[in-house]
Image (tube, rainbow, N blue to C red):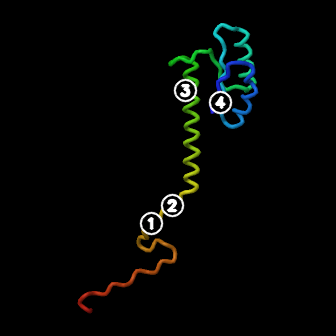
Amino acid sequence: MIHIADGPSEVLVFSVIKRYGGRTHAAHQPGAADEVRRVRERQAQDRIFACGPVDHRDGSPTFMLIRNGAEHAAKQILAGRQRTAGEKIRTPPRHVVDGDAPGAPPEPEQLPLDGA
């Protein structure tokens, strides 16, 4: 889960998102020194994952952080599903070759065709 906060009222959401493995991104107005200071303090307290200016245009630092967070979340989901599938799917049966199974009977002796 990714959560982008645009105000101090959303700070309480951060702990819930973080508890469940999500990432939080706090946005601030460019040039608003007070906002930047508060956001940086929360980042130093490990309450938010990242922060940046309110600019979600393609290629902006905020856009790249959000994109990276989405890719990270997708990889976590995929890894979890692969792990779950690996636990549920058993190894398929295979052919026994040259008595490699435990307790396999010995190969019968071949008799010559000429009766000797």
Dot placed on the residue nearer the N-terminal end, 2 or 3: 3
Badge 4 or badge 2: first in the primary sequence: 4
Q: CB of mark 4 within 8 Å of CB of mark 2?
A: no
Residues at circles 1 and 2 in contact by the CB criterion of under 8 Å: yes
Q: Against 80, is 16 above or below? A: above
Determine which of the numbered discs, if any, sits on residue 23 in the image: 4
Residue ID for mark 3: 67
**Amino acid carrying mark 3 in the image:** Arg
Q: How far is mark 1 from mark 3, CA to CA?
A: 44 Å
Label 1 residue SS? loop
Please name which of the two marks, 4 or 2, marks the residue nearer to the observer.
Answer: 4
CB-based contact (under 8 Å), mark 1 and mark 3: no
Q: Amino acid at mark 2?
A: Thr
The residue under label 2 is 91
- Amino acid type of the residue that numbered disc 1 sits on in the rendered structure: Arg
Residue 47, picture quadrant: top right
The tag earlier along the polypeptide, 1 or 4, is 4
Q: Label 1: which residue? A: 94
Q: x and y percent of residue 46 in the render?
A: 73, 26
Q: What's the distance in space between the residues labelled 1 and 2, CA to CA?
A: 9 Å
Q: Residues within 10 Å of mark 2 (few under 14, many from 20)?
A: few
